[in-house]
Image (cartoon, rainbow, N blue to C red):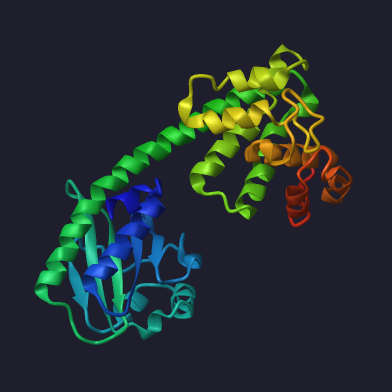
Amino acid sequence: MLADLLGKPNVEGVLEGALAHAAQLLGGSVKGYAVLRRGQDVLTAVHGYPKSLVGLSLSGPWAQMRPRLLADGPRELYSMNTPEVVRQLDAAGMNDVKATVVVPMVDKGRNVGALILDQFESGGVPAQRQEALNRWGSAVTPLLSVFDTREEWRQGARQLTIALVEAVESQDFDSLGHAQQVAEVSGQLGRQLGLNERELEQLWYGAVLHDVGKIGGETGHASIAANFLHGVPHLADAQKAIRHHHEHFDGSGEPDKLMGEDIPLYARIIAVANALVHVGDASRLKGQAGKRLDPRIVELAQKLPPLEDKG
C-alpha cells in the first residue's frame, strides 16, 4: 500500500491511496472522499465518487478532530452546506448514503483534515475496525506535510526556471511569453497522449527551456539549451527533448538526423507545440505531418482549443 501511495507523488495521489485502503479496512459497499483544511475545507480526493467533486469547498462533521460514526446518512453534512453544494453532493449520489465514518487527520495537534467513508449498506462499524481506520488516518497524515514541502520546492524550481527563460526572451520582445505558451500546448498534447504527472513535469521543463540556448545565438542553440540540464539526472528526459526538438520526422533534421519514433517522444511533442505557437492555426501543420512533424501528434493538435492571441 505504501508503494501505491508513493507511486503518485502528490497530495491527491496520497489521499486517493489512503481512501482506497480505508475502504478495504471498512469493507462492504463504500465510497469516500478526503477533505483538507486550507483556510477553508476543500474536498481534495475521491474514492468511488466522481472526480468533478475535487476542489469543492464545503463544511462538514469533521471539524471536531475526533472520530465519528453518523448513522443518519448525509443529514448533518447537508445541513451545514449551501443548496448549491447540496445539489452537487446529490448529483454524486450522496443522498443514498446510509452511514458515514469520519476519520480525522491530526498532525501535532493541528487539524489537517479528514477521510470520510460513506456506507451504502446498513450494518454499523465494529469498534476494532473503527480503531484500525483511526490508526490508518494517523499513519497517512505525516505524509501530507512531506508532499506540501515538495510542492513548495517544485513551484520554486518552476518560478526560477521561468525567470531564467524570461531573461533570455527579454532580449527579443517578439519572443516574450513564447516558451510558456509552448509549454502549455505541450502539456495539452501530453495529456491527450496519456502522460502521467512525472512525465508531464519532464515535458514542461523541456518545453520551457527549449529555446534558452539562444542566449548564445541561433547556431546550435538546442544543444546549448540541453546543457542547462547537464548534471540534473531526474530531468534527463527533458534534456533529451531539448536536444532533439529540431529533429525532423523524415530524418532531415538536426543535430543527429534521427527519424520517426527514434526521436524522443517529448521532443516530437515540443516540435509540434512550437510549430503551432508559431503559425497559430493547427490546420496549417498538416502539410508538415510525416515530414518535419509526427503525424499522430499533428492529428491530436487539431483537437486543441484555439490559441489565445498574445498580441
The answer to whether residue 126 is left or right of residue 257 is left
Closer to us: 218 or 243: 243
Quarter-of-image position of residue 203? top right
Q: Nearer the viewer, residue 197 or 119?
A: 197
Q: Is residue 79 above or below residue 114?
A: below
In the rendered picture of this protein, how many numbered marks are placed on residues? 0
Residue at 12% from the left image edge and 77% from the top image edge: 126
In the rendered image, the quadrant that contains the C terminus is top right
Residue 167 in view here: no
Q: Residue furthest top?
A: 216
Q: Which residue is rendered at x = 79% and y = 41% of the image?
A: 293
**Residue displayed at 24% across by 46% down:** 142
Q: Nearer the viewer, residue 164 or 16?
A: 16
For residue 252, side relative to residue 31 (left or right): right
Above or below — where is 194 with respect to 116? above
Rendered location of residue 274, percent (x, y): 75, 37
Q: Nearer the viewer, residue 54 or 7?
A: 7
| Residue drawn at 68 percent across, 32 percent down | 179
Task: Residue 82 in the image: state x and y as whole percent.
Answer: 43, 73
Q: Quadrant of the N terminus?
A: bottom left
Q: Quadrant of residue 271?
A: top right
Query: From the viewer's perspective, is residue 227 above or below residue 95?
Result: above
Q: In the drawing, does residue 191 fall left or right of residue 143?
A: right
Q: Is residue 16 above or below residue 26?
A: above
Q: Is residue 7 visible?
A: yes
**Furthest-left residue in view?**
127
Residue 115 screen position, x and y as percent: 29, 63
Q: Position of residue 32 (x, y in %)?
A: 34, 69
